[in-house]
Image (tube, helix red, strand yellow):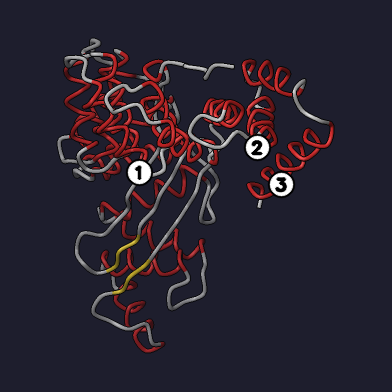
Amino acid sequence: MAVHRLLYVLIRSPRKKYSLDLFVRDGEIRAMTKLLLPIVLLFVSLTCFGFTTAPEKIKELRQLAEQGQARTQFNLGVMYANGYGVPKDDVEAVKWYTKAAEQGHATAQFNLALMYNFGNGGVPKDDVEAVKWYRKAADQGHDQAQCNLALMYDFGNGVPEDDTEAVKWYRKAAEQGYAQAQYNLGVAYDEGNGVPKDDVEAIKWYRKAAEQGYATAQYNLGVMYANGNGVPEDDVEAIKWYRKAAEQGYATAQYNLGVAYYEGNGVPKDDVEAVKWFRKAAEWGEAKAQLNLGIMYGTGNGVPEDYVESYMWLNLAAAQGDEKAKQNKGILSKQMTKEQIAEGQKLSREWFAKRSK
């Protein structure tokens, strides 16, 4: 059996992901939100600066909010959205966000848009309403709102799909240094969506996001160097950026780094190091990494030969539909006892069970 050498330059990362940082710039309350497609994950952490949330303070804040102080209205919205100092109440959060938003508070407008975008907070999902509030915040220069408005145009949510308009808003946010917008603008140039295809310009924006630690941009920048797209082909530079993404847990970069060590591209050939990175990606469920890890165990490259361990990884990759894994599993099973196969199947089930927790 030979290691399946799917060229790492052929594997591309997902085109786009939401990755939004929501925060208040006035130093009063900070809330961080991450949103990923296709599954929406909402994480909020709240830090309060300069005041307590004792009942008398809550009463004072409410009085200020009812007098029309937009900043306090927004803060009450954050507090109700998170149950910070008050019972968690999404309907109340929407109420106070709306009051602040209607007075032009940009982050309140953005938060309100998010709630309509995903149907959170006592309001139905309404992309048209989300676009309305994203636009109000975006027009005030709110970079996350600009990026989300671009995404709405990109996917045709609440507005007609329009790549040119999407690029316009990505650019506004990207020029403010917002990494997600820089990455998506790089993708637009990479694929020629809304702008002429331009690898040099794609590299420019990938690099800006990559230098901020954005893993997918780091990975794509590595791909560009590996392919020689927009830059001279440079395996060493490709490895540099793959490693940065891999160390953040980006599975495809981990897989590509494993291939690089196996083949000696940009790094000295090192089967042990290849196994290390194949394993990291395999544990994330990357089928090609599971295939290669299975083959490394089956041939004893970089690890002691172990048919049971090999069968386990090949079986996991085959379960994802990988044809080469199915072929290699068939070859391997002819060299194994029934007891070994049963043990390999058991390990596969245990791996699935562990991941499902």
Q: Which of these two is toward me, 290 or 141? A: 290
Q: Position of residue 297 (x, y in %)?
A: 58, 32
Depth check, front residue: 86 or 339: 339
Per the image, the residue denoted by label 2 is 309
Q: Secondary structure at mark 3?
A: helix
In the image, 15: left or right of 299? left
**Which sits earlier in the primary sequence, circle 2 or circle 1?**
1
Q: Nearer the viewer, residue 262 or 133?
A: 262
The residue that appears at 71% across and 42% down in the rendered structure is: 347
Where is mark 3, residue-wise?
Answer: 350
Q: Residues within 10 Å of mark 3 (few under 14, many from 20)?
A: few
Q: Quadrant of the N terminus?
A: top right
Residue depicted at x 20% and y 39%:
211
Q: Confirm or deny contact between disc 3 and disc 2 (CB under 8 A).
A: no
* Residue at image location 30% in from the left, 64% down from the top: 30
Q: Which residue is mark 1?
A: 247
State the separation of the CA atoms marked 2 and 1: 25 Å
Q: Secondary structure at mark 1?
A: loop
Asked if residue 182 lies left or right of residue 175, the reply is: right
Q: Earlier in the sequence, mark 3 or mark 2?
A: 2
Q: Position of residue 208 (x, y in %)?
A: 18, 34
Left or right, residue 64 beside residue 114? left
Residue 233, quarter of picture: top left
Whole-percent x and y of residue 49?
26, 75
Q: What is the C-alpha distance between the residues marked 3 and 2? A: 13 Å
Q: Amino acid at mark 3?
A: Glu
* Quadrant hosting residue 210: top left
